[in-house]
Image: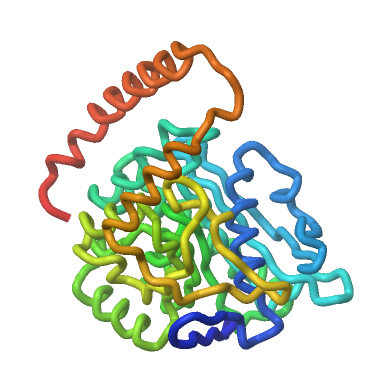
Amino acid sequence: MGPRYWMGAGMGWERAADSGGFSLYQLNLLCQYSYGVGRGDERTLVGRHDFHDERLGAYWVLDSLFSPSNGFEGLVAAPDDGRERPDGAHVTVVFAGTNLEDDARHDLWATPGTFILPAGNPFCQAKEARTLLGQARRQALELGHPEAEPVLTGHSLGGGLALLLAIRNGLQARVFCAVDPWRVLDRRERRAAAEACADGRLVDYRLSNDRLTGPLNHLLSGRDNRCARVVWCGQGQDLLGHWLSGFSFDGSGALMTGQAPAGWAQRLSDRRKRLAAWRPHRPISPWVPVLRAIQLARQLVRDWIRLLPWATAGKV
């Protein structure tokens, strides 16, 4: 079994009850690191690495997977056992989300390709996610823990992938601002998701001012997340309220929870303040983003033509 988690009512903190597994702070950082798999960031290479917060110690990257054809990125990690060896009893699979910095074209199509259109379309990332889960199980076996079941985590699109695989394989998932995979589940899988939510095995940590996942999930399933118990975690400091850096943790890795979403009036006021305070980080020609947007739009139109056979194949 993977780490267990508890949740308090109102304002409070949430932490892993099993000290052998990753803390929520460590899971959050691993999700951030996973966005660098495709470009070969040092913290995603196989081997032992220190978290950039020295209080959190070290972790091991056991394996990783990148698919240039659809933008999938993910890695397999394990805590350091204190003797500079990976702890095979707590193997964790980490899925990256939409990587606009490195591959906007593929990742923008990955969300509808994975959570709306029928499986088998060229932008669906479910197959790669299953492959990475298989790699994680092999790593646990090689480390002498054949009984260990991986814990799944991810952010945004990656969080949706983690929930999807957790539901279909009876695993635990601790995700951040996750896309709801409800629409691509069959009736049996939806019952399994409801049972897992009730047991606390599927948890989605969400910033209360998330302006991406919230509206998207209401379009996909009509709720904040039908496939996970949503735990509200205060407001992010960025305009979209969606990024992993917006979560707050204490020195032990516990996550601050309990701040429910603000009302519409407060959201509108906050948005105006953020827009008024926003400034570009560096001066750029006004034509640069326009030309980039035109180029991306052309690519997206070509991709949509490729997806037409799946989009017209009927309801999922």
User: Residue 47 appears in which quarter of the rendering?
Assistant: bottom right
Answer above or below: position of 48 versus 195: above
Instruction: Tell me if residue 138 can be seen.
Output: no
Quadrant containing the N terminus in the rendered view: bottom right
Would you place residue 4 above or below residue 111 in this image? below
Single out the residue that lies furthest toward the right.
Answer: 83
Display colour scheme: rainbow
Q: Does residue 269 show up? A: yes
130 vs 168, left or right, is right
In the rendered image, which quarter is residue 293 located in?
top left
Lateral position of residue 170 relative to residue 1, left or right: left
Q: Nearer the viewer, residue 253 or 19?
A: 253
Query: In the image shown, does 143 or 115 lie closer to the viewer?
Result: 115
Residue 200, horizontal then vertical, whole percent: 42, 84
For the point 70% across and 42% down, the residue is 41
In the image, 170 versus 198, the foreground residue is: 198
In percent of the image, x 83 and y 70: which residue is there? Answer: 85
Q: Position of residue 156 (x, y in %)?
A: 43, 54
The part of the image, by quadrant, that contains residue 170 is bottom left
Q: 18 above or below 108?
A: below
Residue 31: x and y, percent?
58, 57
Left or right for 160, reference 247: left
- At a point 67% along the width and 78% down the height, the residue shown is 21
As drawn, 23 above or below 61: below
Q: Residue 75: where, in percent of width, then height? A: 61, 55
286 or 143, which lies in front? Answer: 286
